[in-house]
Amino acid sequence: MKTPTVTLTTDWGERGFFAGMVKGALAGLVEGVQVVDISHRLEAYNTMSSSFVVRHACLGFPHGTVHMVDVDSRAPFVALRARGQYFLCSDNGMPSLVFGDEVEECVEIATQPGGIYNFAAYNLFVPVAARLLQGASLRDIGTPHPQLLPRTWPDYLQQGEYYRVYVHYIDDYGNAYLGMTYQQFEALRQGRRFVLQVKEMTVSEVSAAYQRGTDANDLSLRLTVSATGHLELALQRRSLAQLTGLKVNESVLLRFRD
């Protein structure tokens, strides 16, 4: 990788100074470092949402990229390699959700006795990222951490004639990304009609776009396909999450009709 690259995925928000501290420290340690902000607006402590973002936003970077993920940070802190890239994060369930059995190597990051790590991204991840970008191996960073905290990701479950499909992510527009890809949906559908129910709202077709027509008061539910390949629920110029109260890990009901 010609340009040393670090990404930041956090729940810090946009108003604080945290990102500035981390970027300044990285610039002081790694000449020519490029820091890419994935997001600083993830829901605090929500490992499910952060897992969705890391899985779909981080894995396409060049080999050797270092990704710092600071959401629901707590010990143990780990450094792992997957798909030729490095990830610095907490072993809080997020790594096992994102990578599963794709982890190539994982170590618990060495800490100093009596050290203060209440801002792990700055106190711990920055120097580790610098060492990795300068050629250190994971074995130089810490001790082997062979067993990540297991956590399962609820995608969808069949319950009689219905499928209960779980919400994986809510974006800033209030659109809901479901735990079923369009490919999975079509494999189950097999050309049949369907009805998908969200609270008191239903939809029975897949739309090619979020908006249809010019009626700003149109509150009909849209089912479309997101850039991640997942089914996505949306309203035209409205927040579905705000209108319905739909949240991550809640479910919607899908029924196919012969």
Image (cartoon, rainbow, N blue to C red):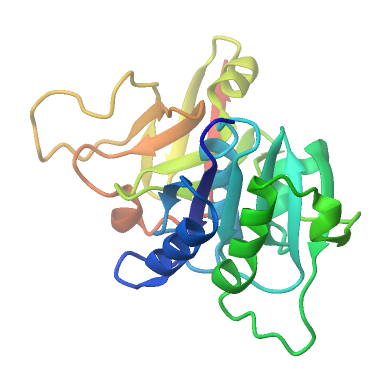
Quarter of the image for residue 76 reads bottom right
Q: Is residue 85 above or below residue 154?
A: above
Q: Is residue 218 above or below residue 31?
A: above
Residue at 39% over, 26% down: 224
Quarter of the image for residue 103 reads top right
Quarter of the image for residue 158 reads top right
Q: Residue furthest top?
A: 191
Q: Position of residue 52 (x, y in %)?
A: 56, 45
Q: Position of residue 242 (x, y in %)?
A: 30, 57
Let me know if residue 58 appears in the view. yes
Let me know if residue 152 appears in the view. no
Q: Horizontal placement of 254 versus 102: left or right? A: left
Q: Nearer the viewer, residue 158 or 137?
A: 137
Quarter of the figure that contains the N terminus? top right
Q: Nearer the viewer, residue 229 or 179?
A: 229
Q: Position of residue 215 (x, y in %)?
A: 8, 32
Residue at 65% over, 85% down: 116
Q: Nearer the viewer, residue 94 or 127?
A: 127
Q: Position of residue 35 (x, y in %)?
A: 45, 48
Q: Horizontal placement of 74 versus 147: left or right? A: left
Residue at 16% over, 36% down: 218
Q: How many marks?
A: 0
Q: Horizontal placement of 145 versus 129: left or right? A: right
Q: Is residue 117 above or below residue 43?
A: below
Q: Nearer the viewer, residue 194 or 144?
A: 144
Quarter of the figure that contains the C terminus? top right
Residue at 50% over, 59% down: 26
